[in-house]
Image: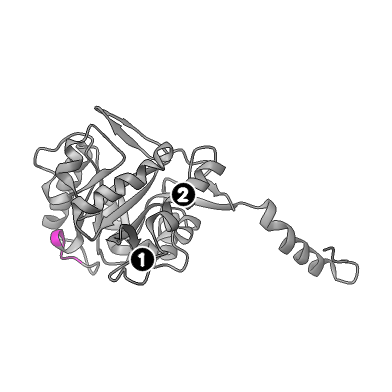
Amino acid sequence: MLIPLVNFSPKKALFILMFFVSPFLVKAQCIALPNAFAHNDYRHKRPLIDAETNGYTHIEADVFLHKNKLVVAHINPYFKGKRTLENLYLIPLQEQVNKNNGYVYAGLEQPVTLMIDIKTDAKKTYAELKTILEKYRPILSSYDTGKVSLRAVTIVLSGHKPYDIVKGEQSRLAFIDEDLRKVDRDTIANVSKMASCKYSKLLKWKGAGNISEREKRRLCNYVSIAHKNGEQVRLWASPDNKAVWNEILSCGVDLINTDKLVALKEFLLSRPNQTTTTATLPN
């Protein structure tokens, strides 16, 4: 259907033209943020998409094994049968990778992390998850007989973690989110890609005044050990304020865990010397 534009002012005509044409020509441009972690991403209005349009490179989904399906939910999976891990995350990610020549974001060659927080039995849930992940092997980072191959998406398991099973596998498509407080113990190389801890388990400071030197040294020590093990560090349930964000980043924490997607994006973009990459997503 063609709409004559002669009866409209230039401004209105341009608006109408953009309304009809832009969905076919324009890709969503954003700044990819390596420190941004979307906590409980599935609770946003548009799971995955809201996080990606704000440049998040680490995204979390809680998963329940229910009637042989991996259902994404916060507490109750019983009435959310269509909100599966595949429908909300794996299928869209594969479509994006196919359109972006092998990457989730065009212009960003580093993997995007999808953290799967297992809420049901670790062994049974992981068995079902393995079957599903095999369908997406071409886009997933993998471990095969001592070698890690990084691809568009890296799967990290949290919650009820099948640590012993994963540790014993010679070929797999998932890695473990280790307990940050245990990183000083012996670890098996290439099992863990991340080390996390609840903020209050390490720090009592909530952003008012100055953090104590004792707490700061404690955090920096854990971060240093985790980095030597090749793990990114995340503190979950941390206070959502700029003072805390600034301090933990200065201690070397890699990932800021938040539900406030826009607020954290604006904070990170305002920081001097912040590492960013301009990237695009297919429409």
- Depth check: 29 or 125 in front? 125
Q: Quadrant of residue 226?
A: top left
Neighbourhood count class around disc 1 (C-alpha, 10 Å): few under 14, some 14–19, many 20 upward: some
**Measured along the vertical axis of the image, is residue 1 above or below residue 112?**
below
Magenta residues, dominant SS class: loop
Residue drawn at x 52%, y 47% as measured from the top left:
96
Residue drawn at x 37%, y 35% as measured from the top left:
150
Q: What stretch is highlighted in magenta?
A: 201-205
Number of numbered tags placed on the structure image: 2
Element on which disc 1 rests: loop
Q: Is residue 203 magenta?
A: yes
> Label 2: which residue?
93
- Depth check: 121 or 67 in front? 67
**Measured along the vertical axis of the image, is residue 172 above or below residue 132?**
above
Give the label on residue 259, or none: 1
| Residue 104 located left or right of residue 245 | right
Residue drawn at x 41%, y 56% as measured from the top left:
268
Q: From mark 1 to mark 2, how far is it between C-alphas?
A: 21 Å
**Measured along the vertical axis of the image, is residue 188 above or below residue 256?**
above
* Callout 1 touching callout 2 (CB < 8 Å): no
Q: Is residue 98 magenta?
A: no
| Residue 12 located left or right of residue 204 | right
Residue type at mark 2?
Leu
- Depth check: 104 or 63 in front? 63
Element on which disc 2 rests: helix
Residue type at mark 1?
Asp
Q: In which quarter of the image is residue 40?
A: bottom left
Extreme residue toward the right, this view: 6
What colour scheme does the image use? one colour
Expressed as whole percent of the image width and height from the top left, the position of residue 273 reads 41, 47
Expressed as whole percent of the image width and height from the top left, the position of residue 132 reads 36, 47
Q: Can residue 252 be seen in this view?
A: no
